Structures are given as structure tokens and as C-alpha cells.
Amino acid sequence: MAAAAGVGAGLGATDAFAGATAARTTAIDDLPADVLSLVLRRLDGASLAAVGCVCSNLRHLAADPATWRDLCLAMWPSLNDIPYSSVAGGGVRYRSLFADAFPFPATSSSPPPPPPSPSASSPAGCNHPLLLERLVSAVDLHHGGALIMSRIVETDTASDWFLGSPFRVDALVQEGFSSPTPAIAAADLSLSWILIDPSTGRAINASSRRPVSVDRKWLTGDTVARFGVVLAGVALEAAVTCDERRGHVREVSLCVENGDGGGVNGRDGLVAVAAAMAGGRCGGGRGTEAAARVRYQEFVAGKKARKEWKARREGMVDLCCSGVGAAAFVGFLVMLTLR
């Protein structure tokens, strides 16, 4: 009986200690708002968005425009130079920009609808809803984690010259620049290229961030690092041309290629970009970077297979034409012999 009483007393003391401990436990909602704000500012964008889904209090703190602005400027320093007048509404909505530009655009199974052909009433076809009149590019180039180029490029996409020419945006307006490091390893480059529609504020990520291929031009000795993102039937391909030995970057440009390896004109490229802006997203973590690289490699493999098939078909056509020509020549000789 005495032992049982001792055990009961011990259990009672344990319950009292547990109750006191529970009473001293502090929930995250009990922290001051300024402390929570400081904690949230240390999160990355994906984690910050996830925290905002926990409760109404955290949702309010996670939607702080200043927090999203600091996060986006740390990730994309070029946004510091974007003019407020360039974007509708008087400035960039950083939370929406991150939701659009951090993930990769989803690859649609069906190509975007073609734009209308130019007419007399609309010389450039600019009244089509999928044709953007202006594009703002936010370009940031890093080497080994260090920023070596950051710039905003505004492109007038409503001109007849842009719509009729191959889609191309150049981020360098001079003869290149030299990196702070004496040499550049193309495999260590990382490129962020965001395309922004200033009329709506929508944006897409136009770069794979890490190179999907690195090629060397044996004639000039330059190295070309390519950063590709596959859309519906086309691929956005950013290229960085550099001299690895001298640490000189000669060219940073963005083009659009179709599945046959040919260039896409400005009109069709704008339609693909606008459709991607309005479409879905497929994440932006390390796993999605690898998946984007695989999609680009599959796109390149399909392009190579189509080129080989076309070459074989043209070879067969040439062989048939040669056979018909030879038969005609032999027939002509026979006719001359029988005369």
C-alpha cells in the first residue's frame, strides 16, 4: 500500500510538471510581429510563400511588399534599375513577379494559336491580344556566384522590323566587357533572364539558370554557354559567348528556335512568349532545373532527328532525280544509236 501510494504521488508530480511545461510553451503566434517579420525576411521565396499558407496572421506578415522586394532584388539585382514608368501601375509587384518568374514555364502539349497576318488596317498586327508591344528584360549573369553583369533591356516589339525579323534580344549594346576574374569557366556561369510584359506586369523565366550545353567555336576560340527553356513547340535559348582565357564576355543574347532548328520571327516568338506568360508554371527548385535541362535535351534530340530525316529524304529525292536523269540520258543515246 505504501509503495502504491508512492507511485501515485510520483505520477501526480509528473502530471503537474507536464502541465507547468505546457503552460510555459510559447506558440509562434505569441511572438511579436516585428520579430516574426525579421524571421520571415531570412526565408527564400518558396518557403515564404509556404509560410503564408499556415494561418491568417502569418499570411498577413508573409505578404509584406518590402519583404518580397528585398527578396527579389537579392535574387535579381537588375530589377534595381527598372524604371517605374516601364511597368503598368507605377512599379513592380514583387510578389506576383516572383510567382511568375521563379518557376519554369510549363510545357504545353499544343502550340499557341498563330497570330493574324498583317493587314492594311493593322500593318504590324499589333492589335492581336497575344502580341506584346514592348518587352522588358531583366538580365543577371553570375560567375562562380559573383555578379559580373546586371542590366535592364527595353525592346520595342511593335515595329515592323522586329515582327518580321528573327526573334532576338541583345543584352550587350557594346563590344562586350571583361570579367573581374582573369579567366572564365563557362560551366560556372549562371544566367537569369526574365521577360516582363510592362502592360500587365506578367513575366516568365527565359533561362535555365545553369548551362544546358557548352560549345567551343574552333575558328575563333570563343566558348558559347547556352541556357534553354522549352515552351510549346519552340525553345527560348539564351547564349553567352565568352573568351575563357581572357575573361572577356563578347555577347549575351536571347533567341527563339522551332523544332526544326530554324529561327522564329518576332511575331511568332511574341505569341509563344505571351502564351507562356498566361500559362502554368512547374516549380523552380533544383529538381525542376534538372527537369528543364532534360526537356531541352529532348528538344535538341528531336531537332537533330528531324534534320537527319530531312537529309535522308532529300538524299533519296536527289538519288531518284539522278536515276531519272541517267535513264533519260541512256534513252537519248539509244534513240541516237537506232537512227
Image (tube, rainbow, N blue to C red):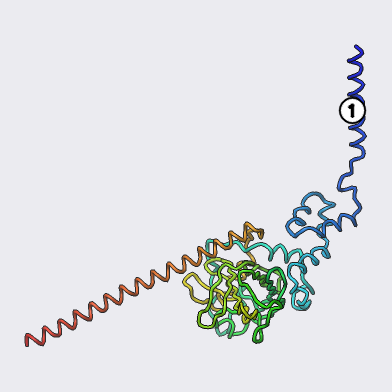
Which quarter of the rendered picture does the C terminus lie within? bottom left
Residue at image mark 1? 14
Measuring from the top left, give residue 147's x and y in whole percent. Answer: 72, 73
> In the depicted view, which residue is nearer to us: 57 or 333?
333
Measuring from the top left, give residue 79's x and y in whole percent. Answer: 75, 73
Q: Say which quarter of the image contains residue 290.
A: bottom right
Q: Which residue is painted at 50% across and 63% down in the image?
A: 298
- Where disc 1 sits, the SS reads helix
> In the depicted view, which residue is nearer to us: 339 or 132?
339
Above or below: residue 284 compared with residue 120: above
- Decide if residue 49 is on the left or right side of residue 156: right
Which quarter of the rendered picture does the N terminus lie within? top right
Q: Which residue is painted at 89% across and 41% down in the image?
A: 25
Measuring from the top left, give residue 260's x and y in whole percent. Answer: 46, 71
The amino acid at mark 1 is Thr
Whether residue 277 appears in this view of the structure is yes
Above or below: residue 107 compared with residue 158: above
- Decide if residue 16 is on the left or right side of residue 133: right
Within 10 angstroms of label 1, few (less than 14), some, or many (20 or more) residues?
few
Q: Which residue is painted at 28% across and 75% down in the image?
A: 319
Q: Which residue is painted at 21% across and 80% down in the image?
A: 326
Measuring from the top left, give residue 45's x and y in whole percent. Answer: 75, 60
